[in-house]
């Protein structure tokens, strides 16, 4: 009986060890896959990798090269399953410009008029990139509101994004900082000096 119990204990320990190793290996592999997917998202359709702005919501950030706004950034969200990227940035008046970029080979530098139209009747277009590797569509939202869903079906090229989930506060701050101007000389008593003089009396 003691021998049987000892053998049973060894078997249980062996099973526990194998289970522990299996679960551990599975967790390590899942973490590896997650990190690889995150890395793939940051490098998706770009030469220079982006950074996470809000990893939990998969929002990325990157400075806009050549922008007139000091230190300005652009945000984006990758949809690898549907092969498109949503990009968005703020203009000097805090209005929003957004674009959708589809990973789709096309005739370089050509424009496609879709059957979709804006409220004013203007035709919505898809433009092919210079290298012929992607189709792009941009839109301006002039009221400054970002709490809305932007979606469309441009003759088969579908997209959807909820901008209410995006944090644009950093972009708004960058625009405000870009409006800094030289401080004009003050001829009177500065408020801080006045307070000091009053306290000293």
Image: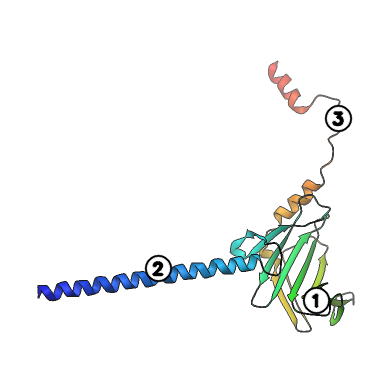
Label placed on residue 132 = 1
Quadrant location of residue 35? bottom right
Residue 145 shows in this picture: no
List x then y, in percent, for residue 11. Answer: 23, 75
Quadrant including the N terminus: bottom left
Label placed on residue 190 = none
Quadrant location of residue 166? bottom right
Q: Residue at x 74, y 63 (%)?
A: 146
How far apart are the two marked residues, 1 and 2, measured between alpha carbons? 45 Å
Residue 185 or residue 32, whichever sits in front: 32
Residue 112 shows in this picture: yes
For the residue carrying disc 3, how many other residues have a C-alpha within 10 Å: few (<14), some (14-19), or many (20+)? Answer: few
Q: Label 3, on which residue?
A: 185
- Secondary structure state at the residue bearing disc 1: loop
How far apart are the two marked residues, 1 and 3, measured between alpha carbons? 55 Å
- Secondary structure state at the residue bearing disc 3: loop
């Amino acid at each position: 009986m003691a021998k049987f119990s000892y053998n049973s204990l060894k078997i249980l320990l062996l099973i526990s060890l194998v289970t522990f190793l299996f679960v551990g290996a599975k967790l390590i592999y899942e973490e590896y896959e997650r990190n690889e997917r995150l890395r793939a998202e940051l490098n998706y359709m770009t030469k220079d990798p982006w950074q996470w702005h809000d990893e939990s919501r998969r929002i990325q950030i990157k400075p806009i090269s050549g922008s007139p706004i000091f230190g300005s950034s652009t945000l984006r969200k990758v949809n690898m399953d549907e092969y498109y990227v949503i990009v968005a940035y703020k203009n000097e008046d805090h209005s929003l410009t957004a674009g959708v970029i589809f990973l789709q080979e096309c005739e370089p530098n050509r424009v496609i008029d879709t059957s979709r139209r804006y409220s004013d009747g203007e035709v919505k277009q898809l433009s092919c990139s210079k290298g012929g590797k992607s189709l792009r569509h941009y839109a301006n939202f002039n009221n400054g509101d970002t709490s809305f869903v932007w979606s469309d079906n441009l003759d088969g090229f579908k997209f959807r994004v909820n901008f209410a989930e995006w944090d644009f506060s950093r972009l708004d701050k960058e625009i405000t900082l870009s409006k800094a101007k030289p401080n004009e000389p003050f001829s009177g008593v500065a408020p801080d000096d006045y307070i000091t003089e009053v306290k000293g009396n």
